[in-house]
Image: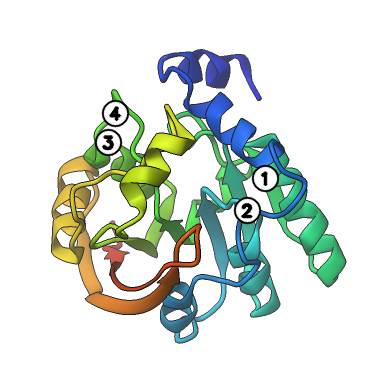
Amino acid sequence: MTESEQTANQAVPGSVAAWEERYSGTEESIWSGNPNESLVATVSDLAPGRVLDVGCGEGADVIWLVEHGWEATGIDLSQTAVDRAAEAASARGVTANFEVGDISTWNDPEPHRGGFDLVVGCFLHTRLPDTREELVGKVAEHVAPGGGLLLVSHAEMPPWAENLDEELGEGLGHHHEPVSPNGDFALLIGGSPKRWEIELAELRTREAEGPDGELAELDDSVLLARRITD
C-alpha cells in the first residue's frame, strides 16, 4: 500500500483495520466462493474485455469473469482477502491481478490502456466521511469511454443486518438507506463529470441465508450504466 493510500485510510477510522480483522480472524472463507447471481446474469450478455472488480473480497466474481473470457483485476482493502483471492484463482488455474487498494486513491497500473471496459461494484460499503455519491464517482472514474459500470446493491436490508453490524463493529456496517437503480444512477450523474446512459436498471430477488441460518428473500438493486463516448 502506498504512502498516499495509508494517509487516506487514516481519515476513515477503523474501517481498513476492521475489514482486515474480519478476514484474518478466521481461517475459513467468509463468503461462499460462488459469483454474484446478478453479476452473472448481467455480464453473460456482454462481450468480454478488461474489467475491474472494486471490493473483490475473496475473488469469486473475478475468477468467474476470467473463466468467461475477461481480463480481470480485483482490489480490496484487506490483504488477507486479496491473498485468499489469489490462492483461489491459482487453484482454479486462472490468471487474474489482485491488489490491496482503496478506490478513493487507487490508480490503474496500466493507464495507457484508457480505463476498463467494465467496472463492477457489488454491495459496496460507504465509509464515512465519504458519501455514496462520492464513492460511486470514484468507482466510475475507471470506466473507459463506451464502457459499463455495474452496481449491485441492497435494495433492502436483511432482517439480521442490525445485529450483524453491532457484532462487526466500526467500519463494517452497511449503508442502511435502501438503494434503487434510479437512485444510484442519480448519484452517478452527480458524482461523475462524464456522460452516462442507463442500459439496465431493475430489482432482482434472491434467496439469502443469515449468520444463524435464517432464510429470507431480498431485493437487490442492479444498475448497468454505459459511459457515453466523449
User: For the residues carrying marks 4 and 2, which lies nearer the camera in this image?
Assistant: 2
Residue 110, position as x, y percentages in the image = 62, 45
Q: Is 187 in front, or is 12?
A: 12
Residue contact between numbered discs 4 and 3, judged by CB atoms under 8 Å: yes
- In the rendered image, the residue lying farthest to the bottom is 45
Residue contact between numbered discs 1 and 2, judged by CB atoms under 8 Å: yes
Q: Quadrant of residue 95?
A: bottom right
The residue indicated by pointer 3 is: 134
145 with respect to 96 (left or right): left
User: For the residues carrying marks 3 and 1, which lies nearer the camera in this image?
Assistant: 1
Q: How far, Cα to Cα, is label 1 from label 4?
A: 23 Å
The residue indicated by pointer 4 is: 130
78 with respect to 159 (left or right): right
Q: What's the residue at 72%, 39% (across, down)?
A: 80
Q: What's the residue at 51%, 81% (across, down)?
A: 47
Q: How far, Cα to Cα, is label 4 from label 3?
A: 6 Å
Q: Is 78 in front, or is 113?
A: 78
The amino acid type found where label 3 is placed reads: Glu
The residue indicated by pointer 1 is: 81
Mark 1 or mark 2, earlier in chain: 2
Mark 4 or mark 2, earlier in chain: 2
